[in-house]
Amino acid sequence: MLNKIVFDLETQKEFAEVGGRGRNHLLRVSVAVAYSYPENKFFVFEEKTVHKLGELLQEADVVVGYNIVDFDYQVLQPYFNYTLDSLPTLDLLVQIERVLGHRISLDAVASATLDAGKSASGLDAIKFWRLGQMDKLKEYCINDVKITRLVYEYASEHGKLFYKDFFKKKEFPIHLPQFVERVNKQKQISLF
């Protein structure tokens, strides 16, 4: 069995506090969650233990996420002494954007495909952090990882996904690659 990891993270700060988008490396991790397929288990990391997430990601055959290349990896990079773009990565948003030609939210895909949406927003997660509501924050991030995993599994099994475009549900084909491109495209690994 491949060592597949699905992960997501939440931040301590908003974009406005760090000078806008494009400065993701300054947002700081509040909590991160990883789901391990081989262990069938969720792992939760706070900022002080995020180095353990780095170890888990380095051991992965493939890291699956939603917008992890343009967001999560950039937030995490200051914590690690290796380059995250060297990880074998399957970013679902990158795959969806290749098909549709534009980006859509995880919530738009999940609610239309799974009839299940996100339990809160990224801004809510920052509020949970500031109020010290770590249980709510962890629960929210675990839910995001669950949803990402289910979207990934649905796309893998059915070769399609759905999204809500205003009030209309739209279907689109999605064929996840038979390989995972490393973000820097230096190496490819076989998934099947």
Image (tube, grey):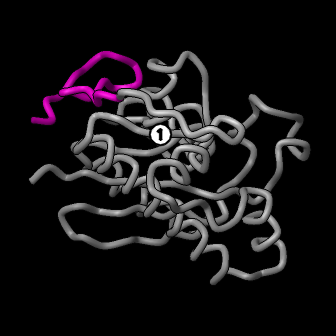
Q: Which residue is mark 1?
A: 162
Where residue 84 sits in the image (x, y, percent)?
44, 36
**Residue most toward the front?**
168
Residue 66 colored magenta?
no
Residue 181 colored magenta?
yes
- Residue shown at 83%/79% (left/top)? 131
Where residue 192 sits in the image (x, y, percent)?
9, 35
Residue 83: quadrant of the picture: top left
Residue 88: quadrant of the picture: top left
- Residue shown at 50%/46% (left/top)? 80
Overall secondary structure of the magenta section:
loop
Q: How many marks?
A: 1
Where residue 14 sits in the image (x, y, percent)?
83, 50
Q: Quadrant of the N terminus?
A: bottom left
- Residue shown at 72%/59% (left/top)? 121
Where residue 91 sits in the image (x, y, percent)?
43, 35
What amino acid is found at the position of numbered circle 1 in the picture? Phe
62 up-or-down from 190: above or below: below
46 up-or-down from 51: above or below: below
Q: Which stretch is magenta?
A: 174-192
Pointer 1 local density, CA inside 10 Å: few below 14, some 14–19, many at least 20: many
Q: Secondary structure at mark 1?
A: strand
Horizontal relation, residue 111 to residue 146: left or right = right
**Closest to the observer: 36 or 152?**
152
Horizontal relation, residue 161 to residue 122: left or right = left
